[in-house]
Image (cartoon, rainbow, N blue to C red):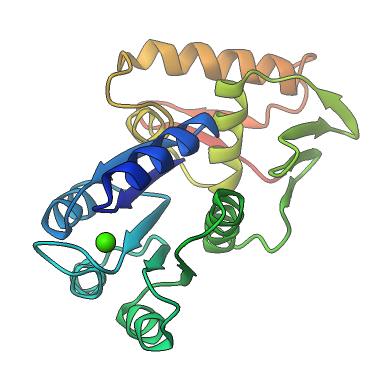
Amino acid sequence: MRVLVVEDEKTLAQQLKERLEGDGMVVDLAVDGREGLYYGEEYDYDVAVVDLGLPELDGVSLIERLRRGERRYPILILTARDSWQDKVGGLEAGADDYLAKPFHYEELLARLRALVRRASGFASPVLRLGSIELDTVAKEVKVGGGRIDLTAYEYNLLEYLMLHPNKVVSKTELTEHLYAQDFERDSNVIEVFVGRLRRKLDPDGELRPIATIRGQGYRLATE
Ligand code: CA
């Protein structure tokens, strides 16, 4: 999952980046509203965290501009005070959820996960497609009721495909959403991970849950 964090408090921003990365996310950090607008328009995110009190361009204006530019990913706002006016202003600008500072990281993480799965149409934290069951809280995967062991990369790949069922997902999209910019962007790496994931999901080659769409990418089919 790729997350945009727009936060000008450097210590908090750095802590958020490290913890979100520790939870398997790719994080882009912007330290003011203008930088946030650049990232937010340039890249596609799964979710964004936007502090409302920002230098250069305030959080509400940033969100308004992203929404005017048809950026549809969910946005969670951070408000410095427990002020209802801030929350209302942010939500009316196009944000989807809010958290007042100070907050517990675990609450932020739970809210971000909920926003992402809701945006993909899942209400339950356990994603089910055909015989595959992915528990986004326990980070466990079952196929036909039996648990399978995945590495962190394989898990993140499967989670991304399950959040976009029946959609052709290109290798570029997978690379951008699953790997940090300093990662070696070699499409062969994605092929290797997809190959391993396929063998673990479907050792007998009967179900073929992940189809290769030649020249376009991969598609996880619901049946
Ligand atoms: Ca601030």
- Given residues 204 and 96, the one toward you in this image is 96
- Given residues 27 and 126, the one toward you in this image is 27
Residue 74 screen position, x and y as percent: 42, 63
Residue 140 screen position, x and y as percent: 76, 33
Count the marks.
Answer: 0
Residue 36 screen position, x and y as percent: 20, 54
197 left or right, relative to 88: right
179 left or right, relative to 102: left
Quarter holding ligand 1: bottom left
Quadrant occupied by the C terminus = top right
Q: Is residue 219 above or below residue 103?
A: above
For the point 53% across and 37% down, the residue is 219
- Given residues 209 and 13, the one toward you in this image is 13
Q: Is residue 8 above or below residue 70?
A: above
For the point 39% across and 60% down, the residue is 73
Residue 68 screen position, x and y as percent: 20, 74
222 left or right, relative to 47: right
* Res 127 seen here: yes
* Res 165 seen here: no
